Image (cartoon, rainbow, N blue to C red):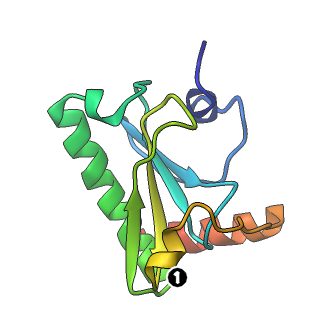
Amino acid sequence: MATIFSRIIKGEIPCYKIAEDERYFAFLDINPLKEGHTLVVPKQETDYIFDLDDDQLAGLIIFSKKIAAAIKKAFPCNRIGIAVLGLEVPHAHIHLVPMDSMEDVNFRNPKLKLSPGQFQEIAEKIRAKI
C-alpha cells in the first residue's frame, strides 16, 4: 500500500507543493512548527532514509539545500534546521524548519494552525525564491 507521501506525490492527496524534479518532491508540512516548515521526500518509496543508496541520499540533501535557501530568503531567520525523524510516516523525509533558536525545532511545541489561504501564501512566497 502506498504511503501518504506517495499519494501526495501522485496528486491523490492535495498538498502545498514547493518544488519537484524527477526524483524529489517538497511540500509544506500541514502541522508546521513555523511558517515555511517544509518536507522533502524522495519520490521512490523507501521507509528509512539510510536505506537510500548513496546517490539518492546525496541527491536528497542537494535538493533540500535548494529548498532551504528559498525558505531562508522567504522567511528570514538565523538558520534552516534540518530534522530526520522517520517514525511517523514509513517514507524517508527531511523536515526543513526556519529557526532562530533551538526551541524552534522542538517537535513537542504546539503546531501552528493555518488556514488554506495562509498555506497557499507561504508556498507562493517560498516558490518565488527558488
Near mark 1 (Cα within 10 A), the count class, few <14, some 14-19 or many ≥20, is: some
Please, what secondary structure does the residue beneath circle 1 have? loop
Q: Which residue is mark 1?
A: 75
- Residue at figure coordinates x 52%, y 82% from the top left: 75
* Residue closer to the observer: 125 or 71: 71
Furthest residue toward left = 54
Looking at the rendering, in which quadrant would you find the N terminus?
top right
Q: Is residue 97 visible?
A: yes
84 or 9, nearer to the observer: 84
Residue at the spot x=56%, y=28% of the render? 6
The quarter of the picture where residue 11 lies is: top right
For this rendering, which residue is in front, 27 or 54? 54
Q: Is residue 128 visible?
A: no
* Left or right: 22 in relation to 11: left
Relative to 75, is 65 on the left or the right? left
Image height check: is 9 above or below 25?
Answer: above
- Residue reaching furthest to the front: 108
Give amino acid for label 1. Phe
Image check: 117 left or right of 43?
right
Find residue 79 and report its image quarter.
bottom left
Where is residue 3 drawn, in percent x and y? 58, 25
Q: In the image, what residue occupies the spot 57% across and 34% down? A: 5
* Residue 64: % across, % down: 35, 56
Q: Residue 69: where, in percent of width, then height?
A: 36, 72
Q: Quadrant of the C terminus?
A: bottom left
